[in-house]
């Protein structure tokens, strides 16, 4: 579930933090920069593991702060392919079942990866498994808040760094009202998404498999 | 910022749990500006991750247990990823083991799977609530028996 990632960065310590121990000031700056943030193609950063090397600190003209090149290791949440994870169902939608682990929310189990045959109940907005036994068909509901075990099948990283001002800008004529651009929709894309499956025996709600 | 090695090492849940609990203790005493805007992200991720991990078997482990676990797992010839999953999840049924161990039908016989379940139950501490429920049921059955 968690991996150690070796990184290098230049850390800026402002002058009012000079009285602190360098290691602690640097640890605080690194955590401020990376904790709870997703690094592209790496994963969700949790916290600093240790600092492996500190190069010399420099002060540049015009800026009173010290700059230090730091080699450090960070704990990152990055499950490997086919890893089995435990989560809770956040909610169900047409796109599938959304699962959360508390610290990480963007986990989706698409409809084709649910235990088949599966049906979406529009009235209750919940997916269910039509489980057939000799006695007849049981409808097993995937309710909100239920513990669910799933396997990681895919991950998607989206680079959400800002792209800069858009190229097509209508010239502003003073005195005339400016029409707002047609696409005001701000689609907040999750920088890191996990796709899971519960199609194998043993996967799905824990209550389905506990005798 | 440069990423030198995106996969330097795999960490068990226990290692992350211990790191976060130690960090929490240290911050409680020394750090004064815990609730400043900049520290909120660290606070949030630490709180949520600890909340998640405290409900998993790793919260009851310690370094000796992990070492003992690895020595008992040696004869089974499992990959690092499989041993890590067994350590993190502590499966109690054959179905769960088949999920975590690839091609388990070919590599492990039924007795070996049973043996693996018993070894895990012995070496890794389990959920005390779950284990208290079982003997309580047995006691109830004995009490109900007509004298």
Image (cartoon, rainbow, N blue to C red):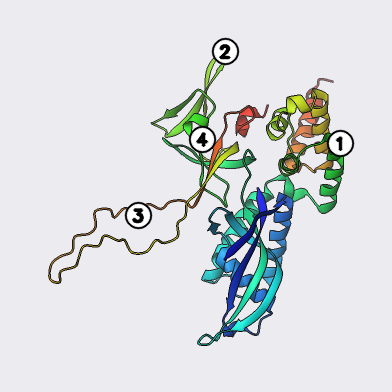
Disc 2 to disc 1, how far (Cα)?
44 Å
Of the two numbered discs 1 and 3 in the rendering, the one whose residue sits closer to the viewer: 1
The reply to whether discs 3 and 2 touch (Cβ–Cβ < 8 Å) is no
**Structural crowding at the residue carrying mark 4, measured as other residues with C-alpha within 10 Å and reported as few (<14), some (14–19) or many (≥20):** some
Is the same chain shared between marks 2 and 4? Answer: yes
Relative vertical location of residue A207 with respect to residue A100 in this rendering, above or below = above
At 43% from the left and 29% from the top, the residue drawn is: A120
In terms of secondary structure, where does tag 4 sit?
A: loop
**Structural crowding at the residue carrying mark 2, measured as other residues with C-alpha within 10 Å and reported as few (<14), some (14–19) or many (≥20):** few
The foreground one among B64 and A67 is A67
Is the same chain shared between marks 1 and 3? Answer: no
Of the two numbered discs 4 and 3 in the rendering, the one whose residue sits closer to the viewer: 3
Can residue B8 be spotted in the picture?
yes
Residue A186 - label: 3
Q: Which residue is mark 1?
A: B75
Disc 1 to disc 3, how far (Cα)?
55 Å
- Residue B138 lies left or right of residue A166; in this view the side is right
Q: Earlier in the sequence, mark 2 or mark 4?
A: 2
At 61% from the left and 50% from the top, the residue drawn is: A78
> Whole-percent x and y of residue A166?
31, 61
Disc 4 to disc 3, how far (Cα)?
30 Å
Residue A135 - label: 2
Quadrant of image for the C terminus of chain A = top right
Disc 3 to disc 2, how far (Cα)?
50 Å
Chain under disc 4 = A
Residue A143 - label: 4
**Structural crowding at the residue carrying mark 3, measured as other residues with C-alpha within 10 Å and reported as few (<14), some (14–19) or many (≥20):** few
């Amino acid at each position: 579930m968690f991996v150690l990632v070796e990184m290098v960065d230049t850390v800026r310590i402002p002058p009012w933090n000079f009285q602190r121990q360098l290691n602690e000031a640097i640890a605080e700056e690194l955590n401020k920069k990376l904790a709870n943030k997703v690094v592209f193609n790496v994963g969700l950063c949790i916290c600093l593991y240790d600092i492996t090397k500190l190069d010399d600190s420099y002060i540049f003209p015009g800026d009173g702060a010290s700059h230090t090149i730091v080699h450090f290791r960070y704990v990152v949440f990055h499950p490997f392919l086919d890893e089995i994870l435990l989560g809770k169902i956040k909610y169900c939608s047409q796109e599938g079942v959304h699962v959360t682990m508390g610290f990480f929310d963007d986990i989706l189990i698409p409809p084709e990866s649910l235990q088949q045959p599966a049906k979406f109940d529009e009235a209750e907005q919940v997916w269910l498994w039509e489980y057939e036994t000799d006695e007849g068909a049981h409808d097993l509901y995937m309710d909100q808040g239920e513990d669910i075990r799933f396997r990681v099948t895919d991950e998607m990283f989206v680079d959400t760094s800002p792209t800069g001002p858009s190229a097509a800008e209508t010239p502003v004529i003073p005195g005339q009202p400016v029409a707002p651009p047609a696409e005001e929709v701000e689609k907040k894309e999750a920088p890191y998404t996990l796709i899971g499956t519960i199609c194998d025996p043993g996967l799905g709600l824990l209550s389905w498999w506990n005798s | 910022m440069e990423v030198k090695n995106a996969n330097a090492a795999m960490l068990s849940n226990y290692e992350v749990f211990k790191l976060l609990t130690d960090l929490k203790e240290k911050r409680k005493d020394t750090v004064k500006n815990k609730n400043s805007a900049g520290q909120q992200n660290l606070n949030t991720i630490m709180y949520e991750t600890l909340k998640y991990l405290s409900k998993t078997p790793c919260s009851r482990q310690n370094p000796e247990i992990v070492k003992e676990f690895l020595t008992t797992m040696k004869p089974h010839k499992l990959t690092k990823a499989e041993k890590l999953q067994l350590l993190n999840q502590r499966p109690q049924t054959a179905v769960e083991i088949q999920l975590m161990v690839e091609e388990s039908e070919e590599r492990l016989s039924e007795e070996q799977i049973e043996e693996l379940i018993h070894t895990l139950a012995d070496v890794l501490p389990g959920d005390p609530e779950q284990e208290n429920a079982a003997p309580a049921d047995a006691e109830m059955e004995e009490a109900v028996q007509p004298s």
